[in-house]
Amino acid sequence: MPAGTFYLRQQHSSQVVEIAGQEPAGDLSADAVFTRSTRPVSVITADCLPILVGCTSGRFVAAIHAGWKGLLGGVIANALGAFSQAGIERQSLRIAIGPGIMACCYEVPTQLTQELQRIHGRLWSGNQPPWFVVRPCQHANSAVASHGEAWLSLARYCTLLLLAEGIEAKHIEASNLCTYCSGLGLASYRRRHHRAEAKAFQYSWIRCLS
């Protein structure tokens, strides 16, 4: 990351903070940061999604740390709300979704998918929800199945939430790389607990043009 990059004390919440540019890195507890300063802002991930948001003017940016708890709690709506409060319309926003654990490796209990359905089921009514009851795919490096109840796609869940907030699909770019099994050396919290690996993270940052 560039020297002086701001980062949060992440807590898997839906909290968003705005920084003016001089705040100490690591002091503020939140999972999204919005700024109009030129100081780079970042999120740190190791299976959760890093989401970077910019606008066509280049004058406002945000970085979002998005696991299922934050997505369920409304971190995306809250972060995009900061742009609205600054007078930035949805059609001006551009979204990049970085690597995260994909449905091929993200095994979750039915209890979680039931909660997702209860809170956000309207977003996929009549269509494929952001999880699968049958594992969608498996690779040589994929996680070993445990209970096999459901397989969650954080990236699809995130995309559905963005679309519901008025972001056009053409303005959302997702890497669709799995942190667990891509074989690209990406950090994975879950893989580290399945195998003997050193702790590691992804650092994703963005800054205003001026």
Image (cartoon, grey):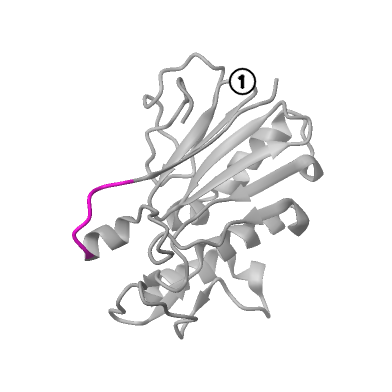
Magenta-drawn stretch contains 198: yes
Judged left or right of residue 65, residue 166 is right
Front one among 81 and 192: 192
Instruction: Give the residue drawn at x 62%, y 48%.
Output: 96
| Outermost residue to the left | 196
Which residue is at the front of the view, 7 or 173? Answer: 173
Q: Which residue is mark 1?
A: 38
Q: Is residue 77 above or below residue 27?
A: below
| Quadrant location, the C terminus | top right
Residue 159 higher or lower than 149, as above or below: above
Which segment is the magenta one?
A: 195-200
Amino acid type, callout 1: Thr
The magenta stretch spans residue 75:
no
Give coordinates of residue 60: x percent, y percent: 68, 29
Q: Residue 21 occupies which quadrant of the picture?
A: top right
> As drawn, which residue projects farthest toward the bottom?
134
- Which residue is at the far top? 22
Q: Is residue 120 left or right of residue 8?
A: right
Q: Quadrant of residue 120?
A: bottom right
Label 1: state its secondary structure: loop
Question: With 166 as the anchor, is 202 left or right in this view?
Answer: left
Q: Position of residue 6 (x, y in %)?
A: 47, 26
Q: Which residue appears at 44% of the width and 82% of the height?
A: 135
Where does the image place residue 201, in percent across and percent down from the top left? 36, 45
Classified by dominant secondary structure, the portion drawn in magenta counts as: loop
State how many labels appear. 1
Q: Residue at x 56, y 21 (%)?
A: 39
Residue 77 screen position, x and y as percent = 62, 46
Circle 1: is it few (<14), some (14-19), or many (20+) Cα within 10 Å? some
